Amino acid sequence: MLYLKTLIIVVQLLSALGVIGLVLLQHGKGADMGAAFGSGASGSLFGATGSANFLSRTTAVLAAVFFVTTLTLTYFGSYKPQTSAGVLGAGPVPASAPAAGASAAAAPTSAPVASSAPGADVPK
């Protein structure tokens, strides 16, 4: 489980860095880093608008990977395994239960409280 968490964290960091880099490379309204790599040139590898589409699609894919890894890490962080019932099936003894006979003599007796719940007056 530890290796899986480590792998997901590495994928999340790489996707975050990829999204940051690709957003900086995209062509904006002015001459930015995208213009330095010829994002609007018609003789480029992807065509006239191919590089913009390629960058925006890759950014969207990396953003989706980042979103999925974040949700997965959230799930793993909130996961708490159930305690085992043991071989005999007896669960753990609650800490608030008094020891048998230890405080039975010291406990004050009080009158039973009337309840409006059905079956409350039936002895056990």
Image (cartoon, rainbow, N blue to C red):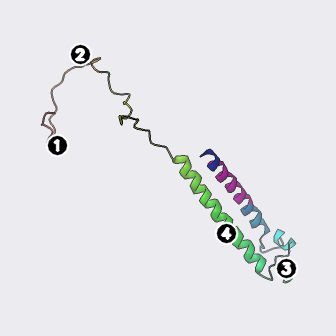
Give the x, y percent position of residue 4. Answer: 62, 50
Q: Earlier in the sequence, mark 2 or mark 4?
A: 4
Query: What is the three-letter code of the residue carrying label 3?
Result: Ser
Q: Secondary structure at mark 3?
A: loop
Of residues 68 and 5, the one nearer the viewer is 5
Left or right relative to 99: residue 32 = right
Query: What is the three-letter code of the residue carrying label 1?
Result: Ala
Residue located at (39% from left, 37% from top):
85
Give the x, y percent position of residue 86. Answer: 41, 35
Q: Report which residue position mark 4 lands on.
A: 60
Classed neighbour count for the residue bearing mark 3: other residues with Cα under 10 Å, few (<14), some (14–19), many (≥20)? some
Nearer to us of marks 1 and 3 is: 3
* Distance between the alpha carbons at the discs numbered 2 and 4: 71 Å
Q: Report which residue position mark 3 lands on.
A: 44
Classed neighbour count for the residue bearing mark 1: other residues with Cα under 10 Å, few (<14), some (14–19), many (≥20)? few
Magenta span: helix, strand or loop, mainly?
helix
Where does the magenta region start and end? 5-17
Of residues 117 and 43, the one nearer the viewer is 43
Is 65 placed above or below 116 here?
A: below
Q: Is residue 30 magenta?
A: no
Give the x, y percent position of residue 94. Answer: 37, 30
- Label disc, if present, on residue 105 of the rendered structure: 2
Of the 4 image quadrants, the one containing the C terminus is: top left
* Distance between the alpha carbons at the discs numbered 4 and 1: 58 Å
- Label disc, if present, on residue 88 of the rendered structure: none
Q: Is residue 16 magenta?
A: yes
Q: Quadrant of residue 11?
A: bottom right
